[in-house]
């Protein structure tokens, strides 16, 4: 096992197997191109090992060019492709062999092919040392493949994780962290998120983070964060994203050994949801599900006014503040349903009934993860 930055990897493919596959590809390319004076277009940075292995076995004339595009952000493939360094020399009318280290979703290849078409190349072929058929979502054929691999994150033989690992001769794959159960408990103010979170955190041994509770704790203790949040909370407005996101991250970091989290009252805006996804993915974790308590608004107002008689919360005691909280919910928060639905992670649960009945309904969803 090796460690690169904050992650651990185990040996996956030996340099002997890699050499053998590189050799087989080199033989094929040599046969097909030795009389065609091709340009090897090497995709930086990762393909430099593979490119050297096939080009040094090429017996005809050839030229060499490099292109650099960025698509990986840590261990997650992002859809945004940017050209960092363009291809030279002039590729117009040339036979081009694109040399990749790994073909994953195919986004990088797609971007490069687009560039080659603009350059009006005569013909292009694609070769890659590693190919992930289960991740590939494009139609372009990959002409010369060294090895097909599973959908694992790998390093070595030119490939890196946050800059490290390119020099390794063997290929290593990421050892997955234990998977957490991370649930966003969702619903409008008064839906019963806090009550249900208390039941579920014990049942599933999860950490419950209520951003509202953390703010109230800070207000009570007159911290700087509390003073800042109070002015927004008293009116029923949302606290600004930056403040809330940083606070949430700090809370999560307090529990490095957690089995998972119940997020209650967070995220409440799209940018909070995106920040949460990014934050969890840096830890090789993700949101398992958004579980939403669905309750009609009239019932909610009544529940909040009743709660205000005992909770002491200023934002529960005045109908205009309550209406403002609903307004914030409708305009900024409700759309999060679409955000999680698009990822097939939204689960609506009827939030009308006894506490036990609702816990039972929520548990049926929690049990799936
Ligand atoms: P809650 O206890 O979840 O009803 O939250 C009470 C108040 O805390 C909200 O009305 C907001 O002013 C503030 N708050 C709690 N969570 C967030 C969040 N994720 N983003 C912004 N403001 C929040």
Image (cartoon, rainbow, N blue to C red):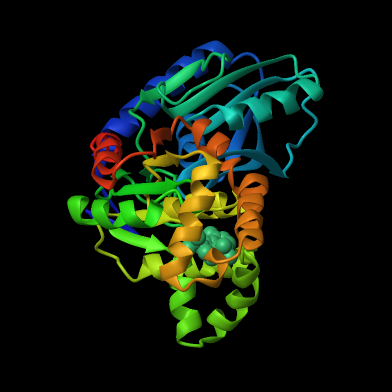
* 247 lies above or below 277: below
Task: Please give left or right for residue 350 compared with residue 84 in the image.
Answer: left
Task: Please give left or right for residue 256 compared with residue 157 in the image.
Answer: left
Q: Residue at x 48, y 27 (%)?
A: 128
Residue 341 percent coordinates (x, y): 50, 32
Residue 173 percent coordinates (x, y): 30, 43
Position of the C terminus by quadrant: top left
Query: In the current view of this chain or complex, which residue is farthest to the bottom?
Result: 222
> Residue 26's image quarter?
top left
Q: Residue at x 40, y 45 (%)?
A: 287
Observer-nearest of 193 and 139 = 193
Task: Please give left or right for residue 157 compared with residue 230 in the image.
Answer: left
State the count of labels.
0
Tell me which image quadrant ligand 1 sits in.
bottom right
Observer-nearest of 328 and 73 = 328
Observer-nearest of 141 and 317 = 317
């Amino acid at each position: 096992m090796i460690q690169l930055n904050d992650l651990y990897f185990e040996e996956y493919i030996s340099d002997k197997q890699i050499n053998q596959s590189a050799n087989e590809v080199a033989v094929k390319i040599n046969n097909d191109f030795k009389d065609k004076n091709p340009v090897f277009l090497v995709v930086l940075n990762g393909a430099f090992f593979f490119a050297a292995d096939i080009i040094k076995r090429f017996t005809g004339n050839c030229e060499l060019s490099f292109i650099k595009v960025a698509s990986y952000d840590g261990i997650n493939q992002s859809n945004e492709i940017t050209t960092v360094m363009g291809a030279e020399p002039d590729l117009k009318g040339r036979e081009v062999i694109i040399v990749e280290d790994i073909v994953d979703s195919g986004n990088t290849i797609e971007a490069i092919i687009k560039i080659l078409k603009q350059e009006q190349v005569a013909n292009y072929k694609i070769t890659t040392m590693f190919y992930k058929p289960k991740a590939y979502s494009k139609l372009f054929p990959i002409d010369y493949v060294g090895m097909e691999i599973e959908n694992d994150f790998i390093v070595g033989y030119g490939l890196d994780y946050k800059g490290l690992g390119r020099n390794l001769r063997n290929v290593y794959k990421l050892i997955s962290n234990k998977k957490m159960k991370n649930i966003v408990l969702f619903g409008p103010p008064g839906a019963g998120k806090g009550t249900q979170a208390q039941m579920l955190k014990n049942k599933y041994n999860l950490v419950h983070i209520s951003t509202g509770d953390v703010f109230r704790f800070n207000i009570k203790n007159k911290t700087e964060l509390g003073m800042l949040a109070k002015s927004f909370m008293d009116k029923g407005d949302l606290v600004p994203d930056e403040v809330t996101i940083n606070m949430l991250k700090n809370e999560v970091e307090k529990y490095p050994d957690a089995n998972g989290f119940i997020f209650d009252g967070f995220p409440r805006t799209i940018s909070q949801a995106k920040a949460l996804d990014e934050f969890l993915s840096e830890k090789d974790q993700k949101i398992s599900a958004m579980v939403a308590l669905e309750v009609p608004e009239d019932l909610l107002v009544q529940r909040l006014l009743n709660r205000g008689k005992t909770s002491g919360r200023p934002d529960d005691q005045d109908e205009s503040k309550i209406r403002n909280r609903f307004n914030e919910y409708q305009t900024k928060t409700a759309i999060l349903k679409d955000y999680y639905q698009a990822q097939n992670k939204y689960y609506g649960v009827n939030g009308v009934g006894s506490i036990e009945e609702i816990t039972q309904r929520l548990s049926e969803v929690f049990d799936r993860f």
